Amino acid sequence: MNNNNVIDIKDIKVHFDIKRSLAQDIIRKNKIILKAVDGVSFSIGKGEILSLVGESGSGKTTTGKAILQLAPLTAGSVDFLGEEVRQKDKAFMKRFRQNAQMIFQDPYQSINPRNIVLDIVAEPLDVHGLVKTEAEREEKVRIALEQAGMGPVEEYLYRYPHELSGGQRQRVVLASSMILEPTFVVADEPVSMLDASIRTGILRLLLELRDKKELSYLFITHDLSLAWLISDRIAIMYLGKIMEIGKPDLIIHKGAHPYTRALTAIMPQPGVNKRTERVILPGETPSPIEELKGCKFSTRCPIAKDICKEIEPLLEEIERGHFVACHFAKEI
Amino acid sequence: MTLLEVKNLKTYFDTSKGLYKAVDGTSFDLDYGEALGLVGESGCGKTTCALSITRLLPKEGKIHGGEILLEKTDLVKLNDNEIRSRRWKDVSIIFQGSMNALNPVMKVGDQIAEAVILHEKASKKEALKRAEELFELVEMPSKRINNYPHEFSGGMKQRAMIAMALACNPKVIIGDEPTTALDVMVQAQILNLLEKLRKELKMGLILITHDLSILAETCDKIAVMYAGKIVEIGTIEDIFEKTAHPYTQRLISCFPNVGKEKILPPAIEGVPPNLLEPIKGCSFYPRCHMGIPICLEVEPESRGLGGKHFAACHRSGEVSHEQ
């Protein structure tokens, strides 16, 4: 195992028990289990951005939460800087919580509307008891806000969230995630609620912080073009599994999994396009409650054969650093 | 003959802080079977425009001027009863987040039949038959009309909403961010469906979105809105290749050009102007990278640039070269 990795996850699974009705209990049907994440492994190096791309319900967010110990792991292990996170003592967990942060999707819901900006950004400091005096607290908040591009800081310190625009709110969220100077951040669709015109400002900020402080990110998004733009590697997720993982240009131009290729085919592109016939997958992602035999994608796959419905393909390296879970990856 | 002509539309909201000029002098036209994309940042007046055309404005909102000509009839001048009989038959709308617009305690088929019974004076049986046909039109099994909304997935609810919008064979259909809450794959399915339907049924389609990238493949024309006005309008080629407004240019560059150079485009700094206050000169001036003194003084008029390409900028001829 490479010890330079900030995060190493191995075969993690997050399964949820679904409540059954009394009737189902009486006739003793089998337990209904929702497999949100079903055997995911990857690692993230220092200063690396790994994008996790997939449709809603594919388990992207649950994976992110499981890494941060915010969702219960059913199986598998999460290593942070070479140490296994699970079952560690309180002191370790406290350190872990300072070093690993999350940025949530919706800046309209993730900050307390009744707090002023100063208190929102300072909350992590208060929780961890890191500042002694009021002056020190404010100073740290000022630095964090400035770093997040909220200048002049005085103007915003005593404002409430409703007085801020969407972009400014997300900057406040960023400032409070970054104030503890974490080494690893899970960014869960940090720009999907924002207008295209202000998105790039937030993205630039994330990249700047990576360059300055060697931060590592797990960047969760459904937007493949965005993932291509900012990440070092892309992992494509479908129904709780990773289908393909590799460098952005490989994924976009030489995607080997039929699902990846379906995603790249429908990627909207600004500009005058020749309206080519696009392959659009029929139907929608099946429910993660259903027991699917074989490859999880086989129900919608345009090239599925008998073997796909029987045997689940494993993630295999088809060329250096390019892993694909498909029986026919080499033929495509 | 033009199907729909919007001329100098002005829709203002009466708020406690004064008159909010959400749409302030917007003009465009739409032909049979044509698709127009209306694009802009949130708060630029896209939805207000749609609500004005369907006359569904909340009570604070009033049309203060302009004409909305649908096959030469001015929708603005119609009284409530007249517009009610025309709404859905002439113009229908698919709402943003329409998955939540379905009545949860009513079968989907019955909800569609409701509109047919009201407008076409059909019997319940005929109306349900029509609902079945509509379901097939939007590529769903017709027996699903007997389901309740919670039995549908997000994409299917959106299809049901499209079926409902088509119930009375409207001439114009407005999609207000019809795919925003959907997955990318389902979004592609829905956009394809809308494109197919408008061509088959020769409907005019107005597609409202903040995502410029999806318009290139779905629309014939694009209108870029900023602060209640259309700042540039033209064909897909005009907008993307002969860009004539700095705002359009910046908006286009906000989307990554996959496969080309990996550069993070500059954000458009600042925020749109407050529409409660009078704006002197060009409304985009404070955020514009090409501003010159005249922009601060004189509001640029929409000028023709050949064909159906119009832009409201003092330096419209120089934009493309500045990239």
Image: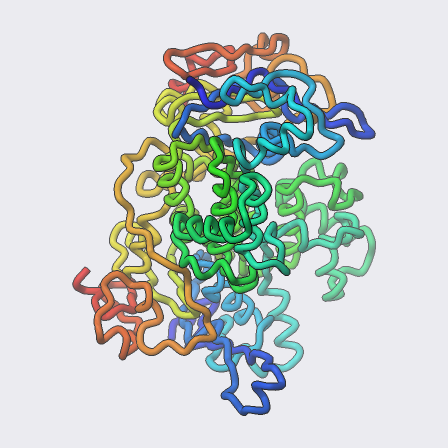
Residue A52, image x, y percentages: 44, 60
Residue A179, image x, y percentages: 66, 55
The reply, left or right, for residue A139 in relation to residue B262 is right
- Quadrant that contains the C terminus of chain B: top left
> Which quadrant of the figure has residue B141?
bottom left
Nearer-the-camera pick, B264 or B221: B221
Residue at 43 percent of width and 64 percent of height = A44
The reply, left or right, for residue B180 in relation to residue B63 is left
Nearer-the-camera pick, A139 or A66: A66
Residue B136, image x, y percentages: 39, 52
Residue at 63 percent of width and 47 percent of height = A170
- Quadrant that contains the N terminus of chain B: top left
Residue at 25 percent of width and 54 percent of height = A254
In the figure, A166 relative to A80: above or below?
above
The reply, left or right, for residue A75 in relation to residue B200 is right
Nearer-the-camera pick, A177 or B246: B246
Nearer-the-camera pick, A297 or B3: B3
In the figure, A174 relative to A58: above or below?
above
The reply, left or right, for residue B133 in relation to residue B312 is left
Residue at 73 percent of width and 21 percent of height = B277
Q: How many marks?
A: 0
Q: Can residue A53 be seen here? A: no
